[in-house]
Amino acid sequence: MSAEPEILVIDDEPQILRALKTILTAQKFRVITAGRGQDGLALAAAHLPDLVILDLGLPDIDGFEVCARLREWTRVPIIVLSVRESEHDKVRALDQGADDYLVKPFGIEELLARIRVALRHSSQAHGDQDSPIKTGDLVIDLARHVVTRDGSEVKLTATEFKLLAYLVQNAGRVLTHQGILTKIWGFEYMDNVEYLRVFMSQLRKKLENDPKHPQYLISEPGIGYRFYLRE
C-alpha cells in the first residue's frame, strides 16, 4: 500500500462525489471517482486502488454486480454506502463480497474510522501470514493454533478456534450469519443462527474482559459479526 492510499469512489450523486473527494483529500488520501458502475470497474482495473467506496444505486449496473465483478479478481476492501437500510440489502452486499456497509446519511468520522480499519486489515493481509496477530491484550497465532490473553494461554475447542480464525482472517469485515455458519459448519447449518450465537458467547467469555460489552467480537444486529482490531 502506498504512503498516500488511493480510494476509488463509485457513486452517481455528483454532490456525494464532490464531498467525499474534498474530505478524503484533506485526510491525505488520493481520490478517483466514477458516476457509473462500468466506469468504476474500468478505473479499478487501471488504478488498482487501495479501497473502493461503492453506492448500490448506479444508473447502468447496480452496486451488487459491481461488487461481485470486483471480487472475481481483487480482494481490495469495499465499503458500501447506500440509502438502502434493509437487512436483506446489507446481507446481499456483504455476501457479494463487500467488507462493510454504511447507510446514508452517514457520519464522516465513522466513515473515516471504517476506512482506517479496512486499510489496516488489508495491509496486514498482504504481510507475513505466519506472524501472530496482536490486538489489545490478545495475541492470536494462527499458524501455531495458540491464543493468549494478558500473557496466559486461552484454551479453545477446535471449533472455537476455527471460528475465531475465520473472523480474525477477515478482521474489519462484516461477516454474515449465513456465511459464517456455512464456512465453519457446512451448508446444512446456514440457518442455525442460534447455534452460532452460542459459540460466539463462549468465545466472548474466554476472550473479552466484559463479554456483555465486547471489544473484539462485535455484533452487527440482524446481519452477523466482525472482529475488531484494536490499536
Image (spheres, helix red, strand yellow):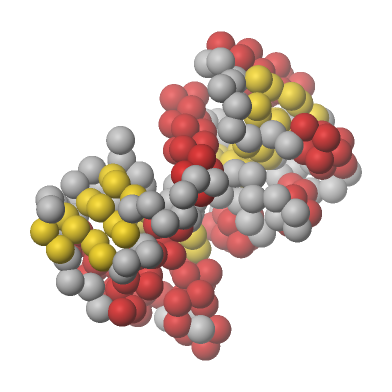
Q: Residue at x 36, y 47 (%)?
A: 228
Q: Residue at x 56, y 15 (%)?
A: 28
Q: Residue at x 56, y 22 (%)?
A: 3
Of residues 96 and 206, the one drawn nearer to the viewer in this rendering:
206
Examine the rendered structure and indicate whether residue 113 appears above or below residue 136: above
Q: Residue at x 36, y 63 (%)?
A: 142
Q: Quadrant of residue 37?
A: top right
Of residues 197 and 49, the one drawn nearer to the viewer in this rendering:
49
Of residues 3 and 6, the one drawn nearer to the viewer in this rendering:
3
Query: Residue pushed farthest bottom?
Result: 188
Image spot of residue 31 (x, y percent): 68, 22
- Quadrant placement of the C terminus: top left
Answer with left or right where residue 33 lies relative to residue 60.
left
Examine the rendered structure and indicate whether residue 3 appears above or below residue 128: above
- Quadrant placement of the N terminus: top right
Answer with left or right where residue 98 lies relative to residue 230.
right
Q: Quadrant of residue 200?
A: bottom left
Examine the rendered structure and indicate whether residue 53 appears above or below residue 214: above
The answer to whether residue 152 is seen in the rendering is yes
Q: Quadrant of residue 46?
A: top right
Of residues 95 and 150, the one drawn nearer to the viewer in this rendering:
150
The answer to whether residue 197 is seen in the rendering is no
Image spot of residue 69 (x, y percent): 78, 54
Image spot of residue 98 (x, y percent): 61, 51
Total labels drawn: 0
Image spot of residue 181 (x, y percent): 46, 75
